[in-house]
Image: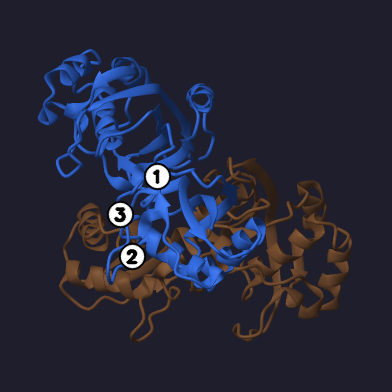
Chain colours: A brown, B blue
Amino acid sequence: MRNFLLTLEYDGTSFHGWQKQPGRRTAQGALESALSHVCRAEIAVDAVSRTDAGVHAYGQRAGFRTDSPIPPDRLVIAANNILCSGRALAGKAGDIRVRAAEPVPDGFHARFDAVGKKYIYKILSSPSPDIFLRDRYWQTQEAPEPGLMAAAAEHIKGTHDFKSFQSAGGNVRATTVRTVHGLEIYRWDTGAGMATAIEVTGDGFLYNMVRIIAGTLYLAGIGKIGPDSVKCILESGERKNAGCTAPPQGLYLAEVYYSEAEMAMAAARHFVRQ
Amino acid sequence: MRNFLLTLEYDGTSFHGWQKQPGRRTAQGALESALSHVCRAEIAVDAVSRTDAGVHAYGQRAGFRTDSPIPPDRLVIAANNILCSGRALAGKAGDIRVRAAEPVPDGFHARFDAVGKKYIYKILSSPSPDIFLRDRYWQTQEAPEPGLMAAAAEHIKGTHDFKSFQSAGGNVRATTVRTVHGLEIYRWDTGAGMATAIEVTGDGFLYNMVRIIAGTLYLAGIGKIGPDSVKCILESGERKNAGCTAPPQGLYLAEVYYSEAEMAMAAARHFVRQ
């Protein structure tokens, strides 16, 4: 069997999330169907992150095994030909793409061997909504102040028990301690509003953790809570003390890391993609 | 009867164009249905431009008459409440929005009184497609050179017979002479590719004229035709000599003008919206 690591990009709008479900269109389902066709055998794909409905990916990673002798570059082209067919028909076709496929050693596991990830959360602030970006940003009327958000973010960086930043419904695990290696705020003008991005790099994230961080930093940004109250929220261990779970369409899984060195460099690097 | 002029914004992706058709979702159909509900009577709306399927609008204009006493600002809010309901459900809801409604004199006609329009045509160039922008740009692998496009554009500016820039299927009119008041090329980096925008202002456009201008300027931009051959294409009066009809998803109806002075100012002004 050959072992492959895929890099994937998808627009989460029309998917019922990553994970395969009977009778619903999911990213995993669309991808497995295309790969099974290309490899002429049933393919099962295991992704690093099971993103929720509406959540996007610039750089999801997933592994699969196959007996097919197809070269990696041909695999990418053939899978994308299927995933993007009927692309002229706007809408569902063409919303997931294989960016790369690389052969990896037999013992490598895309999910278990990942040491960290980077997510981007995007907010667009304008008195009136931008319909062209309705599925790409959390749209707010009030514009958060990036200095206040950055001050609040300082308390989130580092190793903490993030129990208050976890939604019910996640896997109950032995520990809710995670390390946030980088957390940066930046903004730009889209012409139709002020965009604010939260870029967070860490060794792992609890269920909805990034969206709750976004909801909480937004509250700090509009002055509803003081930046230092984030310290108290963390210490309380109570979900109800943190901000709302920001909506899924603002969230992007940007990168996955397989070494501490790679993650350390990435945490300090600004991921440019508007 | 009160006479209203609407300013509309829509994402053309999920519409079968502007014009109402039985059994298909159109921008006119969605808008008339919302306005009829708000005004409690059957409303018929007449737009300046009957945009094709996939074509977008930042500033379409449309007129309608009603006996309803509703104030204009309430009309906007009530119509948008209907048009954007279920907006959390990504996809079709929320893809059309009333930006403004203004009372106009009884004799005013949104379409007949318009003296000109501005369109934007957007191209995104990158070796690999950006799936997040698949319905927003014409995506090309090769990046056109803006200097060559601008040189070619010089021949299109002014008053000409644009017969070679008209698709079959348009209304056969007495004249194919039109005046292009402004035609500018500008570009920016999206982070995932180089964006090129063509901004064209004129007193009227033949069927598919902007998309054929885009297809022709692109050919000049990648060096497939010399900039000066655009002069010959115009003089020939033959559609087959011009470039392809660029795809609909790159086209945006940006503004509509009701006075020559307004249009002259707008032709010189850069419409900033990425």
- Crowding at mark 1 (Cα within 10 Å: few <14, some 14-19, many 20+): some
Disc 3 + disc 2, Cβ < 8 Å? no
Residue A28: quarter of image: bottom left
- Crowding at mark 3 (Cα within 10 Å: few <14, some 14-19, many 20+): some
Callout 3: SS = loop
- Residue at screen point 38% across, 75% down: A26
- Nearer the observer, B24 or B75: B75
| Residue identified by numbered label 3 | B53
Q: Position of residue B231 (x, y in %)?
A: 21, 15
- Crowding at mark 2 (Cα within 10 Å: few <14, some 14-19, many 20+): some
Say which amino acid is labelled 3: Ala
CA distance for labels 2 and 1: 30 Å
Q: Is residue A202 visible?
A: no
Residue A14: quarter of image: bottom left
Q: Nearer the viewer, mark 3 or mark 1?
A: 1
Left or right of A216 in this view: B134: left
| Residue identified by numbered label 1 | B48
- Nearer the observer, B12 or A240: B12
Disc 2 + disc 1, Cβ < 8 Å? no
Disc 3 + disc 1, Cβ < 8 Å? no
Dot 2: chain letter: A
Question: Residue A80, relative to residue B115: is it above or below?
Answer: below
| Residue identified by numbered label 2 | A92
Q: Position of residue B214 (x, y in %)?
A: 29, 32
